[in-house]
Image (cartoon, helix red, strand yellow):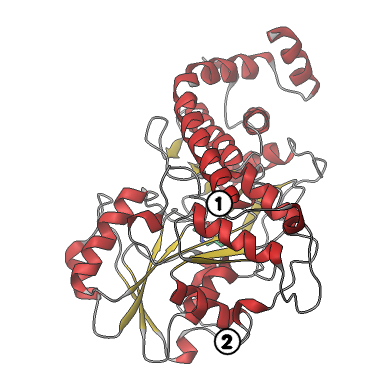
Amino acid sequence: MSEIKENIYRDFGICDEVYAYCSRIADELSPRFQKIDEIAEYNQAKVVRAMQEARVSEECLNGTTGYGYNDIGRDTLEAVYAKAFHAEDALVRSQIVCGTHALATALFGNTRPGDEIFSPVGLPYDTLQEVIGIRESAGSLKEYGISFNYVDLLPDGSFDYEGIRNGINERTKLVTIQRSRGYASRHTLSVAEIGDLIRFIREIKKDVTVMVDNCYGEFIETIEPIDVGADMIVGSLIKNPGGGIAPVGGYIAGTKKCIENAASRLTAPGLLKEVGPSLGNNRLLYQGFFMAPHVAASAEKGAIFAANIYERLGFEVAPNSTEPREDIIQAITFHDPQGVISFSKGIQKAAPVEAYVTPEPTQMPGYSDEVIMAAGCFIAGSSIELSCDGPIREPYTVYFQGGLTWYHAKFGIMMSLQQMIEDGFVKKEQLV
Ligand SMILES: *Cc1c(COP(=O)(O)O)cnc(C)c1O
């Protein structure tokens, strides 16, 4: 078996040393992968139970057009999300264009002029900075008189409880907690850590709304942030919960009040959740959510594999090869822009779609630095599929994520390593 695998990888230009090195590391990881499979097995059952309890029927898989009144598929899907995430209600819509749009909808809907938004975990993800107005932008929350304040984590990665206490004031209306690291160097929060933080914040201000940016975190643990007290969780359907099948969309799950506020912003006051055709997407959104626990587990395995492959070659990886995982993102730091570019080229060469193109750094809407992205995806820009991206700035870190199957994630990392060798960043002799 090993030999026929070796042969097909050879067809892709993967040398025997890379194959042997990667295979050995993959073998060593199997006890850890077994634990990931157990979480996925639990989450699979959780999703099926939500679908059964919501009484998903064949009719739900059809769609509506126009206003989308009485779209039973859409309404039932929202009930499925609410049940799976233990929320009172949810908005799961194709009209939510991406994660940033979902987060903006949740923030605009749940704040009013004069309110303040507070982040106890540092600056939020790049694209949210324009939504909030940290970077000037027409139509930002700041222009509507909604201010923003934040404190960073302490240098050791723990919460700055003193700073948080001082950062919350009488105007603080909404606390935003980003679970995943995004493009920051801090660690990704575990759901238990988020729970500790929420408990502390509620002691200071009981009635504050707590929103968690759940991007990339869904189904990595057996609990989600609502289980530890969040009012609202928000994410993108072209990441974990879409299972690689949802062609577009975002979700917000949370309390009735939070969802109503968000719906009035997404559609219009008064129209709320009653409008919004699902078009032809219902079946894909159900199927994607059904696949999501398995897909998230595959991507997580890929991330752990990448950490092990690159850490042993002397690169800085975060999380490291043995740390517990809270999302599917793997950061690898090269301290050289060419390292980021080489790695990305290798990933692109493993793609099922457009493997023949060469990724290059470019300016992207919402980002302040040039960004390089490798993604040969079935769904444009889908980062639950094998992909990597990174802003071209110090310390030149690439963020690798996704892989709809573990085999594809593994293949992608092998191709990246082969490319790093060909471009002179790694020597074959190091592969021991
Ligand atoms: C991906 C992501 C977002 C939203 O990004 P979109 O590209 O708009 O979907 C927000 N926060 C975090 C932490 C993310 O990873």
- Against 118, residue 338 (above or below) is above
How far from the left and from the top, in percent, is residue 98? 63, 65
Which numbered disc flags the more N-terminal residue, 1 or 2?
1
Q: Residue at x 67, y 68 (%)?
A: 97
Residue 93 visible in image: no
In which image quadrant can residue 167 be found? bottom left
Q: In this image, 94 relative to 153: left or right?
A: right
Q: Position of residue 69 (x, y in %)?
A: 73, 76
Would you say residue 287 is visible in this rendering? yes
- Residue 390 placed where, x, y %? 57, 52
Q: Secondary structure at mark 2?
A: loop
* The N terminus lies in quadrant: top right
| Label 1 to label 2: alpha-carbon separation | 44 Å
Task: Identify residue for label 1.
Answer: 53
Q: Which amino acid type corresponds to the residue marked 1 in the rendered image? A: Glu
Give the foreground label among 1 and 2: 1
Q: Is residue 130 above or below residue 243?
A: below
Residue located at (62% from left, 29% from top): 410
Residue occupied by mark 2: 138
Residue sitting nearer the eye, 343 or 59: 59
Q: Amino acid at mark 2?
A: Ala
Residue at figure coordinates x 72%, y 14% from the top left = 6
Q: Quadrant of ligand 1?
A: bottom right
Depth check: give the residue in front, 388 or 38. 38
Name the secondary structure under disc 1: helix
